Amino acid sequence: MDGYFRSTVVVVTGASRGIGRSTALEFARRGARVVLAARTADRLAHVADEVRALGAEVLAVPTDVTAPDSVRALVAGTVGRFGRIDVLVNNAGIGKVGAAESATFDDDVHQTLRASLFGMIDVTRAVLPIMRRQGSGTVVGMSSVMGRKAFARFGSYAIVMHAVSAFSDSLRQELAGSGVRVSVIHPALTATDLLRDTDEAEMPPPFRHMTPLSADDVARAVVRAVRRGRRRVVLPRTASILLLAEAFSPRLGDLVATALTKRPVARMLGMSRGTTYHDAILSLPATG
């Protein structure tokens, strides 16, 4: 435990697994007092035990970020226990794969908006008055590389990740001078349960041979972003090539996205090292 975040109160949504769990544990290792929020109480209790084993204080609050009463209870419970909120990591969310012409596309967009965007907005709005009174705090938004560049068959997810990025960018400017900072994280494909039930053949083409980041990779990036006041983080760094190409020209961005469907190109950029997403998640316990 390095103690940098000692006594800092960190709220993590979607904390029962994947990036949320890893982020909670990473902050705990640095001395933070961690508040875990997720819908499933038994998985949340297991993560709470992991946090305690690291010697950190923890509060587990079963929370549905899409339910206003549940969000209010999370914030009230946190302030009642610790008296403040220093960091909010908005990680709760879902992802759907499917073409724009698929029968479920509309529903996919609505479900993802509700869980990944409006939930984030509601939790953030509930926490901001506390951070403003403190004159300090950090709000972290968990977006994606697709929050800047969409891939085929992932339109519903990309729509929402773009919205997460836009909300974060707008909020950062609104909070200028308040002492409250905003960071947005843009990880590439990560080895979490997000696409566990998606057939490999249905994956967006660049993802089929891409080696995913680990949840721990992303968690360490979140902690560094909060510690250093980073406004935007892209993971891995080579993914910035795609985003720079897209910023310069959509045609060039599409060319890079198409090139990433070729294993040699992805390998040259260090994004394909032989292990695919589905290979990686075979080692992860199913969470149901």
Image (cartoon, rainbow, N blue to C red):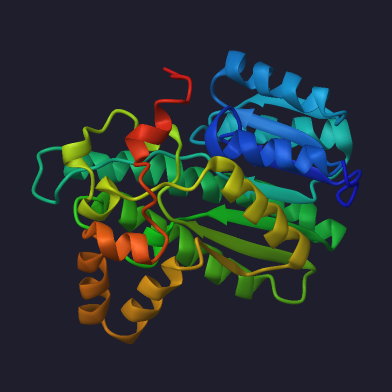
> Residue at the bottom extreme?
248
Residue 175 vs residue 257, the one in the foreground: 257
Q: In the picture provided, is 9 more to the left or to the right than 282? A: right
Compared with 112, 46 (above or below) is above
Q: Please say whether residue 195 is visible from this viewpoint.
A: no
Image coordinates for residue 56, horizontal then vertical, percent: 85, 31
Q: Nearer the viewer, residue 158 or 76?
A: 158
Residue 212 locus on image (x, y percent): 42, 46
Number of marks drawn: 0
Q: Residue, x 48% and y 20% (percent of image)?
A: 285
Q: Residue 74, percent across and down?
A: 68, 32
Q: Against 171, is 156 above or below?
A: above
The quarter of the picture where the C terminus appears is: top left
Residue 134 vs residue 242, the one in the foreground? 242
Q: In this rendering, is residue 208 above or below 17?
A: below
The structure residue drawn at horizontal position 46% and vertical position 58%, both measured from the top left corner, is: 164
User: Percent position (x, y) of residue 134?
Assistant: 86, 57
Q: Report which quarter residue 185 is drawn in.
A: bottom right
Residue 27: image quadrant is top right
